Image: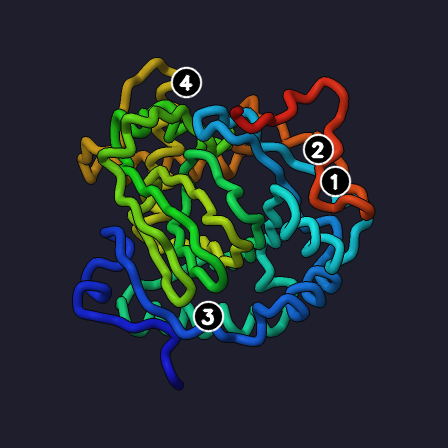
Amino acid sequence: MTGLLTWSDDHRHNFTKKTLLFSHELAGSDLFTDEALIDLIDRYPPDKLEVFSMGYDPSNWGQWYLGRRSGLDGRALMDGVKAGRLWLNLRKVNHADPAFNELCGRMFAELERESGQKTLKPDLGLLISSPKAHVFYHLDIPLVMLWQVRGVKKLFVYPPTAPFVSNPDLEGIALRESDEQLPYDPSWDKDAMVHDLKPGEMITWPQNAPHRIVNHDMVNVSMSIEFMTPAAIWRANVLYANGCLRRWFGCKPQIDKRVLPFEAAKVIYARAIKAFGGFNGAKSPLTPRFSLDATQPGVPQFDDGVDVPKKAA
């Protein structure tokens, strides 16, 4: 079977360890035409599709708003993406659509064959986003691949260490105590890997590396694919245990100071806590803050009291 990615020895040896850029074969696929995406949105479970809008200041991550689909069909939502400032997220589309499930299977069979690493918990998310839309500075607990299919986006990837992320913040995300967004300082950009991600490119970075995204002036279609390896699950459990030790016992663990026997004990500790119900954090689910109108699908109708984003003069 023909591979989806172009692999080098560096890709094979450093997959999941370094930030790596690949070429892929999906930019011209019929899965990603406007009509195919409209049909996919109409087939996708309505309660699972997430629609977001956002402010303009990359440091004001409080202006990342979940919205209501308001009954709009796939064509109206695509019109809204083209005309407005929207970000559609079809999470776990591989669980909802046979073609994407088959594609996901091909991807991960190739990743395991070429890298020699066992992959677990694959989650293929489809992102359809407006010209100049952006995603705030944040990190993910799983490993991530970003496959660019249409449009161009500027990607900033930062080291997964202080000052770019603190141990308490990293633990809070692992514990689901807080959102994935993090405090951002524009001066950190000088230390970031910056790349204009183009159709036919895929990029992946080390686990927990903070990143942010700014679309160029065009509609973007991407696949954001989360997954785990045994090593990634180990690290996630150590972070979980560190968070509990810090919050319950006042300890000050650091993820980069590794002592393997202690880490094994932490993994057992984390799994035991999860088995008994897990850490009870204070994170609240996102509340929808705007609606959409079929007559102006690109214009979010914000609820009363929302800090409505305003473009700088």
Residue 128: x and y in percent read 58, 54
Q: Nearer the viewer, mark 3 or mark 2?
A: 3
**Along the polypeptide, which appears first: circle 2 or circle 4?**
4
Asked if labels 1 and 3 touch by Cβ distance under 8 angstroms, the answer is no
Measured Cα–Cα span from mark 4 to mark 1: 35 Å
Outermost residue to the top = 250
The quadrant holding residue 266 is: top left
Q: Nearer the viewer, mark 3 or mark 1?
A: 3
Residue 253: x and y in percent read 27, 24
Which amino acid is tagged 3?
Ala
Q: Which residue is mark 1?
A: 68
Measured Cα–Cα span from mark 1 to mark 2: 6 Å
The quadrant holding residue 163 is: top left
Which disc is residue 27 wearing? 3
Measured Cα–Cα span from mark 2 to mark 4: 30 Å
**Along the polypeptide, which appears first: circle 3 or circle 1?**
3
* As drawn, 249 above or below 31: above
Q: Residue at coordinates 59% horizontally, 74% vertically from top-left?
A: 99
Residue 139: x and y in percent read 40, 38
The quadrant holding residue 183 is: top left
Q: Which residue is mark 4?
A: 247
Q: Nearer the viewer, residue 26 or 112?
A: 26
Secondary element under disc 4, as helix, strand or loop, is helix
Q: Is residue 3 left or right of residue 32?
A: left
Secondary element under disc 2, as helix, strand or loop, is loop
Asked if labels 1 and 4 touch by Cβ distance under 8 angstroms, the answer is no
